Image (spheres, grey):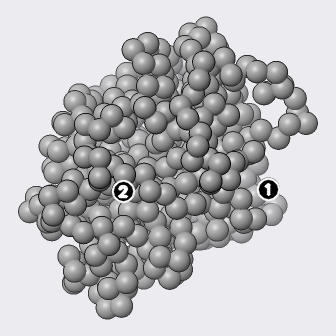
Amino acid sequence: MAFARLSVRRLVTAFGIGTMLLTWASVTTPATAQTISAPAGASLDRTALNGTLHAIHEAGMYGTYSSVRDARAKWQGAAGVADVRTGKPVHPGMLHRVGSISKTFTAVAVLQQVARGRVELDAPIGRYLPDLVTGARGQAITVRMLLNHTSGLGDHIVGAFPSLLQGSTASLDDNRFRTFQPEELVRLGLAAPAAGEPGQRWSYSNTNYVIAGLLLKKVTGTDAETYITRNVIRKAGLKDTSFPRTPFIPGPHSRAYESFYGLIDPPRDYSVYNMSWIYTAGAVVSTMNDLNTFYRALLGGELLDAQRFAEMVRTVPVTDERGNVLFNYGLGIYAQDLPCGRFWGHDGAVFGSGTISLSSPDGKRQLSIGINLMKYQTVDENGAIQVHPIDIALSTHLLQALCGSQAAAPNALTEPSVPLFLTEPLWPKIK
């Protein structure tokens, strides 16, 4: 089947960055992109936001919820159902597994330890975890390389869910209640084929952020989830954000439906799941409002000092197979350029739950959106992901939320001859 043609690297990236990222096709060069400022002339058109959000549901998404801010103005909306069997509607304040957005939280925590002098960004990880990342790799891979995904380490995902290599999702069900130890995940990642030499290029690996969690545990003397909760989540003033200690989401939430490109038909609910398989790389539960609060606090200097924040936003380019720069990745955060300016944030994808959170550099203009059906697209005979109407509807809402009136500029969305979006999932394109 076509699914079997997906490469291991493409497959594992589906569980981190990319299945949700919607990239502007006319990407500016990195040098030009650095000069782009916060969006000008943006405004909260509540009628338009409500319409574009409902269009995502009408395009086939079961349920979606979105929170948009512009300075002190705020809009929240929801469309669709949280449970396809009962028809229970979604609402804007639902708790949601945010996947790899967790990496921003983890990176902030590590950078706090850098500020305290307990960690050096350019020190080898073998200095801190000599019995875990051993030998030449332990000496060559730095803390910075883990946080910006240039370590060259493979990903533990396929090792944790081996049936995926056979075009089967049986492992997803087999491991629903399994507890993985983070050290086990690291060993799986170290055993996976390397993506390159340390520092050579960007290549996404969830294992990088599992190691980052173990680094936090080593230097703080407490488990990483507890440290992040006390020093990042609480410091940002988040009321509905946590690392759940059980497979259950601790409060009102949607079900989380996974299709896996048609391998699971009908899509199955994975809202109850032991998230130890992703640890500090993706186990955070939050709300869309809390995510906006978090990124506003981060960009506003409330979580890191200026020197450490400057390190966080030092980026490396992420390119497609033709060398085009898709976006720029820092330390647990990326920069995405849209027609109205540059935005910072992250996206996340776990079984059944997808999330995007983007903010203008000053933290004033923000969008966080969650969906409860994942990998709804199909795969063609060549293993390529096919664009789905949901992708286009998500792109439209993203632009309306972040660019406001500029999203409705002439030809911006109406002229098919203008190739505006790469709305297919990013992960098949990453080298």
- Percent across and percent down for residue 38 are 53, 31
Question: What crowding class fits label 2: few (fewer than 14 Cα within 10 Å), some (14-19), or many (20 or more)?
Answer: some
Between 400 and 307, which is closer to the camera in this rendering?
307
Residue extending farthest right: 417
Seen at 84% across and 26% down, the residue is 411
Q: Where is residue 359 in the image (x, y as percent from the top left)?
A: 47, 34
Residue 382, placed above or below residue 125: above
Mark 1 surroundings within 10 Å by alpha-carbon count, few (fewer than 14), some (14 through 19), many (20 or more): few
Inspect the image, locate mark 1, and give the three-letter code of the amino acid beneath it: Asp
Q: Position of residue 9 (x, y in %)?
A: 58, 69
Which of these two is toward me, 299 or 427?
299
Q: Name the residue under label 1.
A: 380
**Percent position (x, y) of residue 193?**
51, 81
Quarter placement of the N terminus: bottom right
Could you say which disc has been placed on residue 311 in the image? 2
- What distance separates the C-alpha of mark 2 from that of mark 1? 41 Å
Res. 202 visible in picture: yes
> Which amino acid is tagged 2?
Glu
Total number of numbered discs in the rendering: 2
Q: Answer yes or no: is residue 370 visible.
A: no
Name the residue: 17% across, 44% down. Answer: 231
For image coordinates 56% across by 15% down, the residue present is 43
